[in-house]
Amino acid sequence: MPLGNTLDVAVIGGGPGGLYAAALLARQGHRVQVWERNAPDDTFGFGVVLSDETLGGIERADTDVYEALGAEFVRWDDIDIVHRGRLHTSGGHGFAALGRRRLLHVLHARCTALGVTLRFRTPAPPADALAASHDLVVAADGVHSATRQSAAEHFRPTLTSGRCRYIWLAADFAFDAFRFEIAETEHGVMQLHAYPYAPDASTVIVEMREEVWRAAGLDLCDEAESADRCAKAFSEALRGRPLRGNRSAWTGFRTVVNERWSHGNTVLLGDAAHTAHFSIGSGTKLAVEDALALAEAVAAEPDVPAALAAYEAARRPAVASTQRAAAASMRWFEELAGYVDQPDRQFAFNLLTRSRRVTHGNLRLRDERFTRAVERDFGCPDDRTPPMFTPLTLRGLTLRNRVVVSPMDMYSAADGDGLPGDFHLVHLGARALGGAGLVMTEMVCVSPQGRITPGCTGLYTDAQAAAWRRIADFVHTSAPGTALGVQLGHSGRKGSTRLMWEGMDDPLPEGNWPVAAASPLPYRPGVSQVPRALDRRDLAAIRADFAAAAARAADCGFDLLELHCAHGYLLSGFLSPLANHREDAYGGPLENRLRFPLEVFDAVREVWPGDRPMTVRLSATDWAPGGTTAEDAVRIAAAFAAHGADAIDVSTGQVVPDEAPEFGRSYQTPYADRIRNALGVPVIAVGAISSWDDVNSLLLAGRADLCALGRPHLYDPHWTLHAAADQEYAGPAAPWPAPYRAGSRKPPTGKG
């Protein structure tokens, strides 16, 4: 039906999202009916938090609702974090909350005033029946949506359970701020999330890992006993007062994602379409914003199909961003036990920035006093020095700042001889002049058979060593203070392939060399060459190749050496159970799969100068079922650290072609974070880190000691110097080369 006409609209579910959608559509003149199986006052939970952004959308769409809500809100600016008896307060955050029942009453009244038919205590007819008798069906029937389930083949939902249990409770007094408090009990770590929603009431959520919940016996408690025991666990925060429930039960959070949000004239809204963990306060916010977008699309588009397509196109990017932030926040709390030993102020900063939505930069704007204190604890020498421009010492090498130019294969060695040429001199020299503390080479291969492509560089001949020495001399002479690192590796089963831009991982059309690996498993079955399984003589020869390359690297003057044990290349192939199917001492359990990579590490460490650091790059997950897990990565990192690795460079994936990475901003950082805080070993974080604000945030939160950036340095060889200029830093950690000093200020732009 053209949307210039009045639509018959059915809304399934009388929660905030469904009611607000009903009100907005009725305001446009459509006939709207709402079915809600519960009574008007029945609701789960207590308070609702809405952001200023959401409130602005409500104000623009319906001032009556905005003004009615405004009279009910409790507002505050502070977040309190209590860690081992120490309270830290961060201000400037800005929250608004009200009781969930009050929100429903406001929406009930608005719907009634606009002529919406509200059917309480009445289950909705099946969605397909409503779709046959109505022009538009809005399914706002929650996380357990029957509508979604009945048409799962169309919506294609994915539901993922978290690792914690939580319960919604309430206290009959108002907290002064949004409060996070940690209880370290004999059973494990528990956490409290609490905020005021009325002058005399607060929402209190208690959460803990499933195993802690069971060990504490809370799985055997009813609502009253659960409330009582939670009150005792957090008696100081509650000032000895009790907690109460509201049909409260322990549950696990389920993340809902749907491939499609609409089917025919039926559309999903709110938790039926998507969920985001409560720790970023997003459920009601997302549902209300969905309602706003749906109403706008209905008003703007010529028919229902176009409106539903426009609604989904408008909302998907924002929802995906929120779900990524919520997933990061949820995982942070799931791994909370790994953070409790952090210094208390750093712990507080880590908590505040857990979702990556709050960063060092905007936290400085919100609360400069708190952020300056965190910076001082970190070691920033003064208020003018950002965290990224503090030095770090690894063994006998002191890096002047925390920025690393990540290893990036250039595939530009000429004539297949493995020689780095003028391209490499200019490429690495430009990045060294650009201010980074450490510039890494691409993966430099230890033998002709260990190359990925004919364009890969090597360190298996004296001529190659001489070419690398020329580059190292240039860096040390023309960019004094910049460290140059070499990454040594062997391609394994991913070798003998075309240059990246000619077909990444595709076999060479001619001139192939034989490849070898832990097991005779091709990287891409039916496409890649089947590798030869290495025997003990082969392993000894490869160990010798690595040691010889390392000795040459030392003579070249490299300041740091990294052993490449990631991305499915030879040593990574030994570590991953998906690539290593051996039945000898080098296969099977993780201890055996570690054996050869550790032997290579020991051989390299033996010839590498004792005062120069060694790092190891790992794939901390294979992003595939049955592969390396985050828990395995901690054990692997611990083994290399025990053998003398000075830092772990934490990457992920590229081990099997059918991986499913969770791409997003700094998406690999949680793996570096976990290794660092589990082992206390320095880590290099890498993977979609692109802003200096993110670098500062990761360092201050204790998630990384160094940050490696690849693509940003391809876009801008002077990324580090420009980051210094943008932050008005002109200290010794980012000196402009003398010939470039005239360019140390951003040129003026033309007038518009």
Image (tube, rainbow, N blue to C red):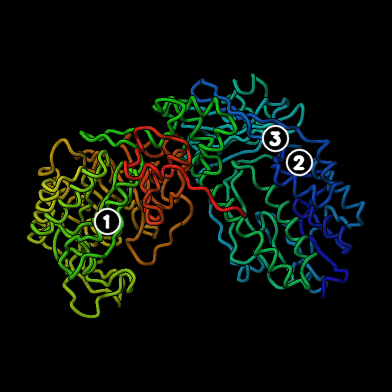
Q: Label 1 sits on what residue type?
A: Val
Q: Is residue 154 left or right of residue 85?
A: right
From mark 1 to mark 3, how far is it between C-alphas?
A: 66 Å
Which label lies toward us, 1 or 3? 1
Q: Secondary structure at mark 2?
A: helix
Is 42 located above or below residue 419 in the figure?
above
Write down the residue under mark 3: 245
- For the residue carrying disc 3, how many other residues have a C-alpha within 10 Å: few (<14), some (14-19), or many (20+)? many
Quadrant placement of the N terminus: bottom right
Return the mark for residue 100. Answer: 2
Write down the residue under mark 1: 426
Which badge, 2 or 3, is on the more N-terminal residue?
A: 2
Q: Label 3 sits on what residue type?
A: Gly
Report the front residue among 71 and 34.
71
- For the residue carrying disc 1, how many other residues have a C-alpha within 10 Å: few (<14), some (14-19), or many (20+)? few
The answer to which quarter of the image holds residue 131 is bottom right
Q: Label 2 sits on what residue type?
A: Arg
Q: Secondary structure at mark 1?
A: helix
Which badge, 2 or 1, is on the more N-terminal residue?
A: 2
From mark 2 to mark 3, how far is it between C-alphas?
A: 14 Å
The answer to which quarter of the image holds residue 503 is bottom left
Q: Is residue 141 left or right of residue 649?
A: right
Which label lies toward us, 2 or 3? 2
Residue 92 in the image, given as x and y percentages of width and height: 63, 31
Residue 496 in the image, given as x and y percentages of width and height: 22, 71
Q: Is residue 197 visible?
A: yes
From mark 2 to mark 1, how far is it between C-alphas?
A: 62 Å
Q: Is residue 37 visible?
A: no
